[in-house]
């Protein structure tokens, strides 16, 4: 092969920016494709309103982003935004608007302004500054990395766009379905020297920018938590946190996983809660969602903000056999307004409830529902695969008595009480594993997987080789150190690849107070849910048990 064969392959087989633009705009742009801006992006018009999709932030001062002149800023302090120009042109000194992932035309808070300091073309380990870059090019832009969390849209400011239909929408945030789409492994960190906490916090902010699937969070107990996809991913993050982005010594706790909360039955009774002023009363019940529906909602298959009620109703009627009234009474998803795996439904009747008053309180009830599903009642983990039905409401006549300050916390409380009366369960993440090994050691690997609550679903020979491929599922909580154990047992003859696959119910009842947990001893299978609940609540600084007083009114407690 000639050294230039790869280059020729790319030149003759990759479509040009103009040819590929229609598919890219259809997949990535969240706005309609029949507007003037979308049509101009499809044509790669260099003279139109600037539109850039920033997909990655690269740290400056590292060898891969050294300028051709040899100068570079301090390592890891600033980032270059890497993005594709869909429309218009960009040059040094341009003032641009940078809508983030949370931007919408109705709420433009996440849309700061910035000035472009330089525009460069990436050339391997170097980048070469250019005077101007036009539509169709991939560029590195300096000057507005402080405005970007992970991905962003960059557009020009002002202009003569008079058409309302050409209102700018953002490019969709990146999804990673090939690696499971979620970061489920969790690591708690703190600086060795408490005085260096601000440095570590700044380092975590940079980690979140540099790693597309890394998430950082501060728990109510004050601990700083990093979410990643696996042990190697978190190992890379910790190396960069210590040596690149903060340059301090960091202590880490044992890795754990993020859980989810769900229900497996309908609420045993109608749950209600009164507002603080005793003038409003909300009644709800919780039910599990249809199988597979949560995954469809998370994938964005149901566009509740874009479809009308009839289209949403047809979807649930045809796919999940819902009745017409239920299908058209979907109010919102939670905890994410667009991709949440939980549904809030209005199951009230016009003959029993004043729909006008109910509509006026709808935004507050939706906010309370999304707050409740973001932090569930068991251990303040996100809720998943549940359906909340509003059965009855008693609302005050005067708007001042049914404001958001009264409705939101009450809606959250009644959602939590509904979940607690519907047989709540914990969900844990499960890895899908692919293990490649010699055929004579397959039988020895099966017990190693079974010991960690895993199971093999397939083992078959790889054609044309002496190897076997094993496919297995294993809870992420029991996967820590599995790769090391596997290599030691097989003397390096096996390789494993782990990817998050699905959520599974943890065995046992998390609210069973009769279970006695013994320290430093592994819990039996049916005690795991209680074990995980108690340890998670302790780690978050919560009381060991779920408080009934917090979630149930006095009248509700008497009924229970």
Image (cartoon, rainbow, N blue to C red):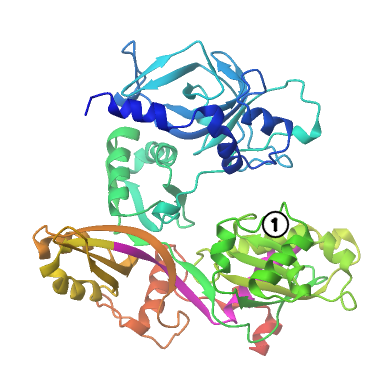
Toward which corner of the image does residue 114 lie, by quadrant? Answer: top right
Quarter the N terminus occupies: top left
| Left-right relation of 13 to 321 | left
Toward which corner of the image does residue 467 lie, by quadrant? Answer: bottom left
In this view of the protein, which residue sits in the foreground, 112 or 493?
A: 493
Residue 408, given in percent of the width and then of the height, sits at 71, 61
| Left-right relation of 184 to 307 | left
Residue 26 is inside the magenta segment: no
Residue designated by label 1 = 304
Residue 408, can we see it? no
The magenta segment: 405-433
Residue at the location (50% across, 44% down)? 174
Residue 238, given in percent of the width and then of the height, sits at 30, 44
Residue at the location (17% across, 59% down)? 484
Residue 522, can we see it? yes
Toward which corner of the image does residue 33 lie, by quadrant? Answer: top right
In this view of the protein, which residue sits in the foreground, 418 or 304?
A: 304
| Left-right relation of 36 to 51 | right
Quarter the C terminus occupies: bottom right
Residue 434, given in percent of the width and then of the height, sits at 28, 61
Q: Is 371 situated above or below 453?
A: above
């Amino acid at each position: 092969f000639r050294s230039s064969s790869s280059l020729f392959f790319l030149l003759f087989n990759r479509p040009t920016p103009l040819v590929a633009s229609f598919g890219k705009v259809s997949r990535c742009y969240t706005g309609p494709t029949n507007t003037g801006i979308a049509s101009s992006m499809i044509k790669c018009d260099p003279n139109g309103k600037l539109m850039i999709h920033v997909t990655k932030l690269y740290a400056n001062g590292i060898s891969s982003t050294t300028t051709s002149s040899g100068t570079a800023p301090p390592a890891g302090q600033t980032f270059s935004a890497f993005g594709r120009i869909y429309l218009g042109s960009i040059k040094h000194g341009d003032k641009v608007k940078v809508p983030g992932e949370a931007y919408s035309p109705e709420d433009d808070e996440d849309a700061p302004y910035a000035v472009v300091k330089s525009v460069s073309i990436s050339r391997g380990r170097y980048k070469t500054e250019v005077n101007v870059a036009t539509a169709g090019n991939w560029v590195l832009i300096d000057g507005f990395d402080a405005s970007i969390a992970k991905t962003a849209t960059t557009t020009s400011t002002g202009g003569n766009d008079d058409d309302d239909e050409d209102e700018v929408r953002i490019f969709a945030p990146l999804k990673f379905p090939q690696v499971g789409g979620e970061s489920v492994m969790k690591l708690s960190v703190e600086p060795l020297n408490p005085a260096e906490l601000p440095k570590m916090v700044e380092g975590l902010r940079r980690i979140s920018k540099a790693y597309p699937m890394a998430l950082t969070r501060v728990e109510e107990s004050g601990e700083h938590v990093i979410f990643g996809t696996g042990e190697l991913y978190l190992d890379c993050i910790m190396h960069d946190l210590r040596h690149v982005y903060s340059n301090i010594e960091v202590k880490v706790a044992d890795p754990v996983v993020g859980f989810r909360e769900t229900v497996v039955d309908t609420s045993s009774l109608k749950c209600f809660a009164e507002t603080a002023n005793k003038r409003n009363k909300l009644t709800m019940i919780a039910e599990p969602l249809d199988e597979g529906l949560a995954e469809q909602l998370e994938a964005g298959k149901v566009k509740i903000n874009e479809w009308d009620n009839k289209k949403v109703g047809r979807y649930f009627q045809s796919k999940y056999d819902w009745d017409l009234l239920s299908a058209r009474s979907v109010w919102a998803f939670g905890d994410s307004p667009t991709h949440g795996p939980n549904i809030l439904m209005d199951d009230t009747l016009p003959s029993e409830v004043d729909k006008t008053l109910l509509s006026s309180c709808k935004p507050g009830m939706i906010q309370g529902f999304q707050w409740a599903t973001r932090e569930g009642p068991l251990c303040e983990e996100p809720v998943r695969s549940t359906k909340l039905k509003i059965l009855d409401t008693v609302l005050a006549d005067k708007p001042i008595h049914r404001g958001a300050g009264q409705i939101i916390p009450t809606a959250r409380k009644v959602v939590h009480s509904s979940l607690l009366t519907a047989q709540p369960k914990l969900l844990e993440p499960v890895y899908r594993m692919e293990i490649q090994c010699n055929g004579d050691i397959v039988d020895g690997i099966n017990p190693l997987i079974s010991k960690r609550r895993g199971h093999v679903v397939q083992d078959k020979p790889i054609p044309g080789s002496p190897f076997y491929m094993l496919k297995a599922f294993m809870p992420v909580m029991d996967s820590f150190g599995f790769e090391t154990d596997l290599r030691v047992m097989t003397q390096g003859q096996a390789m494993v690849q782990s990817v998050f696959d699905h959520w599974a119910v943890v065995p046992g009842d998390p609210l069973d107070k009769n279970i006695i947990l013994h320290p430093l001893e592994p819990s039996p299978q049916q005690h795991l849910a209680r074990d995980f609940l108690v340890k998670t609540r302790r780690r978050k600084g919560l009381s060991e048990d779920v408080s009934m007083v917090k979630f149930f009114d006095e009248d509700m407690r008497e009924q229970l």
